[in-house]
Structures are given as structure tokens and as C-alpha cells.
Image (cartoon, rainbow, N blue to C red):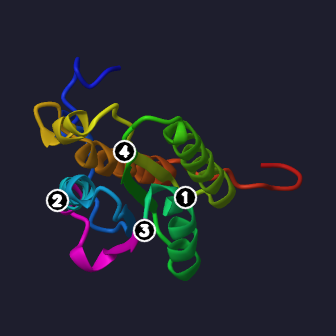
Amino acid sequence: MSSALKNLSDYEEKDIPDSSGLKVGIVVADWHKNITHKLYEGCYDTLVKHGVKEENIQTVQVPGTFELPAGAKIIGSKTKYDAVVCLGCVIKGETTHNEYINNSVAQGLQTLSIMTNVPHIFGVLTPNDEQQAIDRAGGKYGNKGVEAGVTALRMAHLEKSLVKEKKSIGFN
């Protein structure tokens, strides 16, 4: 759904369980830092609001959005997280570089999620111009960082809510 039709910061707060036991990594791209740091603020504040302890949130910065999957893999190799949020912004511009970057990052994060059983959240803005990015980083369409934080919490709780089946041999 287009953010022009939905505010990125709107969600049902009551649907998010207490998250005080969760550990979350955040990887933030420095490129377009006037945008990405606002995404970070929205994400961080959302995590803390729902109980994630500040000491259980680790943040690292990478040069650009393309480096998000590598940054996520690096921090994930050092600490066990319940979710990793990756925040970036790729503005379309005059060439098709944005398509290569966005597809690579999305596939990289999806691969990490599948391979590690840890949700890696795609909190990347893909606007046509800087104004659209501003509008989605705390502007008139809300903050995608909030949406990414909520997604991380929901996915982390999904993992914890499922009961693993016990395997047995013979009669139950």
C-alpha cells in the first residue's frame, strides 16, 4: 500500500506484546543521514516504547544502503539478536542505480533472515526525490523507522510465540 494512502507511523499499539526480553540490532546507512538518522530515531523510540531495554539495542553505522546486509551479518555474528533492523534511503536520481541497490539489499536481507532464522527488516526508503524521503522520515506520511521497529517486534514475537514440536520415537 502506498504511504500516500497510509501513515507509516500508524499501528495498533495494543497488538505489540511487552518486548523487555528482546535484543535488537539496528544498522543505519550514513548516506542521506539527514533522512536515515530520522528513521533511526523513529525506530529506536518505538523499540524503547514497547519495552526493549536501551542496553539491549545495539546500533552500528555503515557508509551506505548497499552495505546494510554486510553490516547486519557482521553484528549478527557477534551477538544473538531477536531481530535486526536495517535503515537506509536510496533516492532514484537520474540513473537506474537505485534499482540495483534496492534489489541487492532486499535480497541480501531476505537471505540473512532465511539463513539465520532472525528477522532482518528492510527499513529502506525508495523515493523518487528528496521531498518524498522527507515526507516518509517523520514528515506528512509518518516515519518508516517506526514501521520498521514495529515490524521487528512483531516478527521477533512471532518466533517466540511458536511452540517447537517435540520429536519422539514410538508412542506418545
Q: Is residue 59 above or below residue 170?
A: below
Residue 45's tag is: 2
Percent x, y for residue 162? Answer: 53, 47
Residue type at mark 3: give it: Pro
User: Magenta stretch?
Assistant: 46-63
Q: Is residue 171 left or right of residue 57?
A: right
Q: Residue at x 26, y 60 (%)?
A: 33
Q: Is residue 29 left or right of residue 133?
A: right
- Mark 4 vs mark 3: give the one in front: 3
Does dot 1 land on a helix, a strand or a loop?
A: loop
Mark 1, residue position: 118
- Mark 1, Cα crowd under 10 Å, few <14 / some 14-19 / many 20+, is some
Q: Residue at x 61, y 52 (%)?
A: 108
- Mark 3 vs mark 2: give the one in front: 3
| Quarter that holds the N terminus | top left
Locate residue 142: give its quadrant.
top left
Q: Is residue 9 visible?
A: no
Does dot 3 land on a helix, a strand or a loop?
A: loop
Distance from label 2 to label 1 (Cα)? 21 Å
Residue 151's tag is: 4
Residue 63's tag is: 3
Residue type at mark 1: give it: Val
- Mark 3 vs mark 1: give the one in front: 3
- Mark 4, Cα crowd under 10 Å, few <14 / some 14-19 / many 20+, is many
- Mark 2 vs mark 1: give the one in front: 2
Residue 49 inside the magenta-drawn segment: yes
Distance from label 4 to label 3 (Cα)? 24 Å
